[in-house]
Image (cartoon, rainbow, N blue to C red):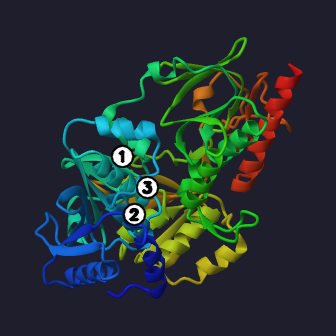
Amino acid sequence: MALEKEIKEQLAGYLELLEQDIVLKVSVASDENSNKLAEFVTEIAAMSPKIHMEKENLAKTPSFSVERVNEDMGIVFAGIPLGHEFTSFVLAILQVSGRSPKVDEKIISQIKKISGTFHFESYVSLTCHNCPDVVQALNIMSILNPNISHTMIEGGMFKDEVEAKNIMAVPTVFVNGEPFGNGRMTIEQIVTKIAGAVDASEFEDKKPFDVLVIGGGPAGASAAIYAARKGIRTGIVAETFGGQVLETLGIENVIGTKYTEGPKLMAQVEEHVNEYDVDVMKSIRVASLTKNEQVEVTLENGAVLTSKTAIISTGARWRNIGVPGESEFKNKGVAYCPHCDGPLFEGKKVAVVGGGNSGIEAAIDLAGIVKHVTVLEFMPELKADQVLQKRLYSLPNVTVLKNVQTKEITGDSKVNGVTYVDRETNEETHIDVEGVFILIGLAPNTEWLEGTVERTKMGEIIVDKHGATNVPGVFAAGDCTDSAYKQIIISMGSGATAALGAFDYMIRN
C-alpha cells in the first residue's frame, strides 16, 4: 500500500530528526495483509538511510518491531499504524532512535523503578481517538524499562483474535495474557495501576496554596492559567488532564479555531498551563473537601492539601440509563463512544439510546459502518437539531423509535438484545442487537461533595456570577456546575471567572 503524498511529506520532516539508526524487523506471510504491511515498512525504510529493514519471525504475523541496532526495545506494531495511530508510529521511531519522550521526570523515574516482567498487548482501531494515548504510553514504558514490552494490535487486521477474546471496545489492554484495562488511560494511570498510588509522603512538603484547582479539564486549566497569571501560588490536582474533551473527536466551535480534535486541543492546553508556575499533580483522586480556617482537600491516599481558596472543576461523565445489563455488559457490547468502538460492530445490528445531538450524531456515524441502527428515544420527539434529524431520516438502515423506555439490555457473554416498553401502550418489545450505544447526556462528578457545597437535585454545584459556591472561598466552574449550557468554550470562560473570583475573594479577606 503506497503512502499518500501528504503523509510522506509529513513523515520526511520527522525522519530528519532521527538520532540513531533503527531497525524495523518484519514478520510476514504470503497473505494480503502481510503484503500490505511489508509494502508499508519497505516504503518507510526507503525514506531514510538511518532506517534498516530485516525479516524476523515475531509472535504475531503480520507485524513489525521497532528496535535499535542490536537492542530490542520491546515495541511491536501488529498491523499498519495509520489513521490515529500514525502519530504513535512516528513517536516510536523517534524515541527508539534516542529522542527523549515528553514525560514528567517523576513518571520517568517511576517507570524505571518498576520490577517484574510486563508484556502488554493493546487492541485498537485506527478510527479510535482514545487509543493513541494508551499505545504511546505503553511504548514509552517499553523504551524506558527493559522489563516492559508492548504490542499494538490493529483489530481490523486481527478480527479472529478480537472475536475469540470477545473484545467489543477499544482500546482493550492485556498484560501477560490477562485483562488489564479498557478505554483511555494516561501514562500516569497505567504506572499507578502497576506500581501503586503515589504515596501520601510525597505531599508532606507542599506549602499552602493560594488557589487549588480540583480537576484538569478545560475549566480547571483555564482557572489555573488565570490564577497563575496573578502571581499567586497555584496548584491543580486531577485524576487525568483533559477531562471529557478527550472523548470528543471533531471540535468546530472553539472561536478562532476552525477545526481541532479533543486530545489535540487538551495537549495544547496542558502545554499552556505548563508555561506558568503551576504545581500540576496528576493521577490523584480527591476524597473530600472541608472549610476550616483554610480550605482542606483530602486525597484518596490520605494526604491533605491546604489552600486559601479552591476551585472545583471536576466536570461530568456520560450518564448511565441504569437498567439491568448496562453495567454487566459494559465493553461487551454496551458502549459510549461511537468513534472508538463503532468499527468493532461492522456489519452488525446496534441500538442507540438517546435522541439528542450526541445520540443522533452517533446513529448517523454508525449507520455508515453497521448493518442497522435502531434509535430509542424516551420522549415523544427527538431533541436533536433539525439538520441532524433530516440527515438521520435520509439513511436507509436506521429505525427511529420514539416515546419508548429502555427496560433491559440482554446477553450471555456479550450483548444479544435490548428490551423496550412503548410508553403509550405499555407494550414490551425485544429486539436483537449486538451493541447498545448509550448517549443520554452527562452526569456531574460531584458525589464526593455530599454535604459540602450546595447542589441542584441533579448534583450540579450552584454558583453565582463570580463562580462562588455557598461556602466562602470555594468556587466552581465548568460542567460540574449549574451552568445553562455545557460547552468547551463556556467551561473555559467559567474557569477564568472562578479564578478571578477567587483572586478577588483573597484580596478582600
| Pointer 1 residue | 328
- Give the CA distance from mark 2 to mark 3: 8 Å
The percent coordinates of residue 139 (x first, y second) are 33, 55
The percent coordinates of residue 341 (x first, y second) are 41, 63
Q: Secondary structure at mark 2?
A: helix
Report if residue 318 is visible in the image.
Answer: no
Residue drawn at the location 10% of the way across and 69% of the way down: 57
Q: Determine the image quadrant of residue 459.
A: top right
Q: Is residue 255 above or below residue 445?
A: below
Foreground of the two, 400 or 350: 350
| Pointer 3 residue | 133
Which label sits in the foreground, 2 or 3? 2
- Give the CA distance from mark 3 to mark 1: 26 Å
Q: In the image, which disc is placed on residue 88?
A: 2
Pick whichever of labels 2 and 1 is earlier in the sequence. Answer: 2
- Give the CA distance from mark 2 to mark 1: 32 Å
Badge 3 density bin: few <14, some 14–19, many ≥20, Cα 10 Å: many
Badge 1 density bin: few <14, some 14–19, many ≥20, Cα 10 Å: some
Report if residue 265 is visible in the image.
Answer: yes
